Image: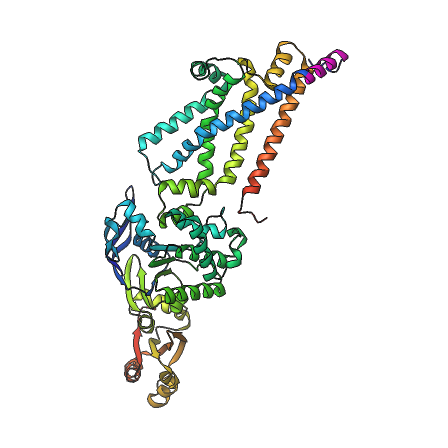
Amino acid sequence: MYDNLFSPASVEQALTCLRNEIPFAIWETFYVTVLSTALAVVLGLPLGVLLVVGEKGGVLPLPGWLMKILNILINLLRSIPFLILMIMVFPLSRLLIGTTVGTTATIVPLVVAAFPFIARLVESSLREVDPNIIEAAQSMGATPMQIICKVMIPESVPSLMSNVTIALTTILGYSAMSGIIGGGGLGKIAINYGYYRYKYLVMLVAVILLIILVQIFQSVGTRLAVKSDKRLKH
Amino acid sequence: MIEIKNLYKTFSSGDDRVDALRDISLTIADGDVYGIIGMSGAGKSTLVRCINMLERPTSGAVIVDGKDMGTLSTSQLRDARREITMIFQQFNLLMQRTCLQNVCFPMELSGVKKAAARKRAMELMELVGLPDKAGAYPAQLSGGQQQRVAIARALATDPKVLLCDEATSALDPNTTHQILSLIRDINAKMGITVVVITHQMSVVKEICKHVAILDHGTVAEEGLVSAVFAAPKSEAARRLVFPDRVDEQVSNPHSEGQLRVIFRDAKTTSIPLVARMARELGIMANVISATTQPIDGETYGSMLLGVPHDQMESALAFLGSIPNMTVEEVTDLV
């Protein structure tokens, strides 16, 4: 399938595409990824906090049955393949956005897929906080809310940042899949040209751009996480 | 005043039950520096956590300044905890905050205005001798400096009681000494009651006025540090005061019995006891170990003597007749 990859005709076509479609596709991918991650954090962060503080012996113990339901729900959402999930949330997309196709509509399945994932990442970040520091805050008369907002979250910021970066790159990968339901972006270009029209050079270009985006997200995220960590002596 | 009355704490998981504390009763006076000492697993940390209810006692009461801590509502307990602050073995500073922000933290919790909190925090950083470290992060500080910041943080809410949970156990001897001096100064200047939890006898000797010796969840012995050190009555106290179980190896219990002699003040220490025993009574005592230590401004000495079994009685009579000295036959070494 990679014969004639660099024939004059296909190079010509790739260049045209690079000029006309790719800049907007990069923007679409970027905006869908970042917006979906941000919304998933809004839902996932409180959920992740609940998973830690709500357990027996936690800062704000919740009824055992509630914790069980939360855990099962998260595992359930996490086990549905994204390709299927995209289709399953159509009613929800219609309810929230008014449509099930298009770039903005893909944000709904992306958020649904990402927030349980982020909740688990937040959970693991918060568990890294030294329990002795939490005990110290309790010994000073901190309320559960103060412990969450002033101790657990601020103390785990570096870890949260690197975990959100992991989520961001994963969601970027998912967003490329959403070309199937008409979501825009680099994924759509790769599928449209490569899968439907056998224009493999364009597909390759789109994939390379996706790789570059992941690299950028990852290195910026890692740098921010390291920079924010005051435990390291600068 | 802190009154601990018939305190029990039992940890149970499934069928396993561990009695961490059994029938503890103690009274700690205002302004005292009170040591609670014991081996690992004796229940010291559990006991100190029962004072501010980080650990709920199974039964019994803790009364601080007339308030029964166990009966307070959640919000009353939070208020009470601002008056009973705590420092820890691992310092437990917030690692993502500067030192000044750490000292501000308890004031932030109780809603003190930011500017006022910063001003007070700066004063406290000066009190603990680290005004130049206000903007530094804890990771940039040595252990001793971190503990100073923790002390400043503990003082931020003007507490009446300072609980020190193995506060010097992670520090070297020199730094330990400095931190203990700081705590003693604070006790003297501000009149804060200090409760010191430790496994180190040297810490108790250095700053405590009273001491309770905890052994397997019970108080083995309690009283003035000087009294307990001069004449430890309980087995647990003796183990801590005379950690010289090597005696067993240098003395033969079949040919000789052992006498523990404890004496106080310089006059007694100047009497040539062993030589007089040999000359006047013909008792050839064998010095197994001897130490002298200053406690609370007085000199205390202790000596372990090996004495032939048939001369034991006359040795006891002779040593018992000397003032400021206690003597007893040791039988538990064997």
Residue B15 image offset from top left, x and y in percent:
28, 43
The image quadrant where one finds the N terminus of chain B is bottom left
Does the magenta run of residues contain A9? yes
Q: Residue furthest top?
A: A197
Residue A41 image offset from top left, x and y in percent:
47, 30
- Of the pair B83 and A120, the residue shown nearer to us: B83
Does the magenta run of residues contain B231? no
Residue B183 image offset from top left, x and y in percent:
41, 63
Residue A2 image offset from top left, x and y in percent:
70, 15
Q: Residue furthest bottom?
A: B280
Looking at the image, what colour scheme do you see?
Answer: rainbow
Q: Residue at x 35, y 29 (%)?
A: A68
- Of the pair A165 and A102, the residue shown nearer to us: A102
Res B290 visible = no
Q: Is residue A17 left or right of residue B88?
A: right
Q: Residue at x 44, y 35 (%)?
A: A123
Position above or below: B110 against B170: above
Position above or below: A190 against B20: above
Res A76 visible = yes
Position above or below: B170 against A9: below
Q: Is residue B136 left or right of residue A141?
A: right
Q: Is residue A102 left or right of residue A201?
A: left
Query: Image quadrant of residue A67?
Result: top left
- The magenta-colored residue range is A8-19
Q: Residue at x 59, y 31 (%)?
A: A217
Q: How many marks?
A: 0
The image quadrant where one finds the C terminus of chain B is bottom left
